[in-house]
Amino acid sequence: MPDDLNDRLGQMGVVSILVVDQADDALRVGEALLEAGMAAMEVPFRTPAAAEAIRLLASHLPGATVGAGTVLTTDNLLAARDAGAQFVVTPALNPWWSKSLSRSGCRSFRG
């Protein structure tokens, strides 16, 4: 069975990273990226605006593939999932964290 998310990310070729201090900025940048044909977007949990930025992108840009990056804690993971992230990127992988990722229902990548 083909993996739709992997297929979409592979076809896009690049994932744009949006680090924003204001969630509204992510929406403006996301709209411009989508218009330019760059539909894969990742918002890292480096600022307090990350979860809201993901929510705005996921809810207002149905053609975008939106994910969360720098997911280091269960709180980040749940916030990303609840905001509508289609995937998460995490630098760490251990048995406990793998179980948390699996239970969350979020698709995860190491990076």
Image (spheres, rainbow, N blue to C red):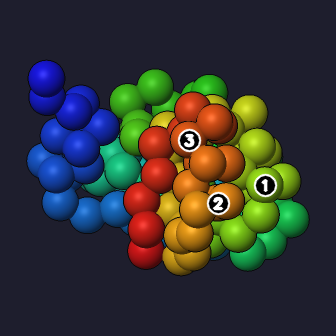
State the residue position of label 1: 74
Specify the label residue 32 is tagged with: none
Residue 95 against residue 88 in the figure, above or below: below
Q: Nearer the viewer, mark 1 or mark 2?
A: 2
Check contact, mark 1 vs mark 3: CB within 8 A. Answer: no
Give the mark nearer the N terminus: 1 vs 2.
1
Q: Please, what secondary structure does the residue beneath circle 2 have?
A: helix
Name the residue rendered at 16%, 51% in the picture.
10
**Percent of width and height locating residue 22:** 80, 62
Q: CA distance from mark 2 to mark 3?
A: 9 Å
Residue 24 in view: no
Q: Give the amino acid at mark 1.
A: Thr
Residue at the disc numbered 3: 102
Specify few, some or many for label 3: CA neighbours under 10 Å numbering under 14, 14-19, or 20 or more: few
Residue type indicated by callout 3: Ser
Pick whichever of labels 2 and 3 is earlier in the sequence. Answer: 2
How many C-alpha atoms fall within 10 Å of the one at disc 1: few (<14), some, or many (≥20)? few
Question: Considering the image in quadrants, where does the N terminus appear?
Answer: top left
Left or right: residue 44 versus residue 73 is left
Q: Position of residue 57 (x, y in %)?
A: 59, 40
Q: Is residue 79 visible?
A: yes
Question: In the image, what residue type sits under mark 2?
Answer: Trp
